[in-house]
Image (tube, coloured by chain):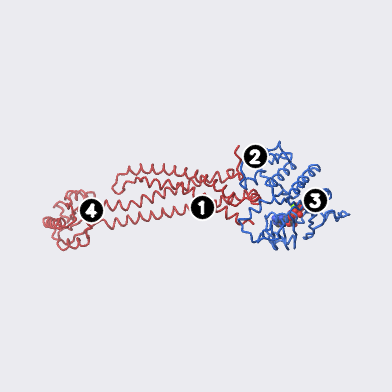
Chain colours: A blue, B red
Amino acid sequence: MVLGGGDVIRFQNVGIRYGLGPEILHDVSLRLEEGSFHFLTGASGAGKSSLLRLMYLANQPSRGLISLFGHDIATTPKRDLPGLRRQVGVVFQDFRLIDHLTAMENVALPLRVAGASEDQVREHVPELLSWVGLSDQIDARPPTLSGGQKQRVAIARAIIARPKLLLADEPTGNVDEHIAMRLMHLFEELNKIGTTVVVATHNKALVTGFAHPRLHLAKGELKVLKAGMPLPENDDEAESEGLQ
Amino acid sequence: MPSAPVLPLTRDASSRFLPWLIAFMVWLAAMAMAAVLVLSSFGNQWRSNLTGTLTVQIAAAPDGQPATSEQRLNRALDILRKTPGVTNAEALPLKRISDLLAPWLGRDVVTETLGLPIPRLIDVKIQPEANIDVAALWERLNKEVDGTQVDDHGAWLDRLIALAGAVEAIALAVLGLISIAAIATVVFATRTSLTIHRDVIELLHVIGAKDEYVADQFHWHALNLGLKGGIAGVLLATATLLGLGSLWSGVESSLLPPISLKIWQWACVLSVALAAAGISTVTARITVLRALGRMP
Ligand SMILES: Nc1ncnc2c1ncn2[C@@H]1O[C@H](COP(=O)(O)OP(=O)(O)OP(=O)(O)O)[C@@H](O)[C@H]1O
Ligand SMILES: [Mg+2]
């Protein structure tokens, strides 16, 4: 079933719970149009990562309807899901790099999984690694990399296969302000060429420095805030906003 | 530089112990297989060795006179030699019978001094394909010479063949049980590997790897382990069988038919290695695909 024409993602009354636990998010309805750029904010534990997990099809909602690139996930045959997942790039909060593979092999993974030729791998991977400033670390394994370097490998892996949708969970959590800005500009570049982007973050400077609408999670509910909405004044509210 | 495998399965503990377990199971299976092959040919060999003969026993004459006994013997021989299908009928000489009895009864037993009534034996050679009706022959002999017994070794042979059949059935059961044990072992080893590499597998799943992509890696790994174990096990089994064969041929007995496996039978025994590799590969693949099928 194809739903919602130009929407990359569409949620209708989605609820999330883990096992028999309480519902973490209730009645989430949202639409991400193709080429949009959103921040995803909310206090720690508000459910940002959980929402993203639904978007990259790692979890199923406990209720409600999700459609990705116009495909209703509940009715899409299982064998078609890998094809949808390949169009989504994910930067995980905990990177999830494979320790025994080199930076090069980690970044090459989405290409290899999709059956790309070794020529393509050799052509694109080193180029992207040098773009994120890791040309010296091509053959390094993740355990020998710093937090910020790992993060950049994770970002390179997320975008190597030119996904239509990029989901980044705290992509600037481990890098200094300068690199954070550089990465944000990279995301903006990708967004300009048509990639739909969602960036979950606690970073106040990012949210205020870049004019993008905000998906905000609080008390299990999702609110969509327009770009440039005033930020909360007092610290208590800032805490609830999850911004530092 | 060839790229490293995404799943470092060769580093799992199971990669070290599984080939040995498989080798052990293949050795057992190959021995059971050899037993089945040998035993299934036993029955036929025994039958063709023994069905060519009958033993006829003539009871001693009621009056105890050696002359009467001799008469009865000749009459029986006469009947036997006229029976179609009998190629030869020869009385066992008294000397041979006394030799046979000597260890129990002493040297003098068949001489007139003791006068013990000794039954006489006739060795009858028949054409195996003649299909002589032993019961009818028995009846005919008894009409002329009462107290005659005909032994076609049938009862004895039947029991021996039943025994061989039972051993064969047990060997087949062992073969079946080993296959089940092998499958269970591979299932558990594969599940352990899936747990060890759950993070990487989940990552592969999320970046759009098809279940077959992951299953392929387990597939080739299991094939490799299965072949290693299989070949080791079959080599051990070959050495064992050759050793047993030389011990066997050292036993001089008409009861033990020669047990040389034919070429096709050796092929069966060696194919246990391939079966092990096949079982290991298919089981690992199915286990992985089923586990991945449960992922969202
Ligand atoms: N696998 C899980 N099983 C059970 N509960 C979980 C699981 N993952 C997350 N949760 C719960 O769901 C809630 C939301 O967690 P989530 O990781 O989505 O928050 P978050 O907004 O990403 O937080 P942070 O900013 O710290 O990363 C938390 O209460 C957490 O305890
Ligand atoms: Mg999180």
User: Mark 3 sits on what residue?
Assistant: A202
- Residue A22 placement, left or right of A241: left
Position of residue B2 measured from the top left corner of the image (x, y, whole percent): 59, 39
- Label 1 amino acid? Ile
- Label 3 amino acid? His
Which mark lies nearer to you, 2 or 3?
2
Which mark lies nearer to you, 1 or 3?
3
Question: How far apart in space, not on screen, are marks 1 and 3 (Cα)?
Answer: 50 Å
User: Mark 2 sits on what residue?
Assistant: A122
Q: Chain of mark 1?
A: B
Question: How far apart in space, not on screen, are marks 4 and 2 (Cα)?
Answer: 82 Å
- Residue placed most toward the observer, A178 or A17: A178
Position of residue B203 measured from the top left corner of the image (x, y, whole percent): 66, 49
**Residue plotted at (73% across, 56% down):** A51
Mark 1: give few (<14), some (14-19) or many (20+) Cα within 10 Å: some
Asked if marks 1 and 3 fall on the same chain, the answer is no
Question: How far apart in space, not on screen, are marks 1 and 2 (Cα)?
Answer: 41 Å
Asked if marks 3 and 4 fall on the same chain, the answer is no
Which mark lies nearer to you, 1 or 2?
2
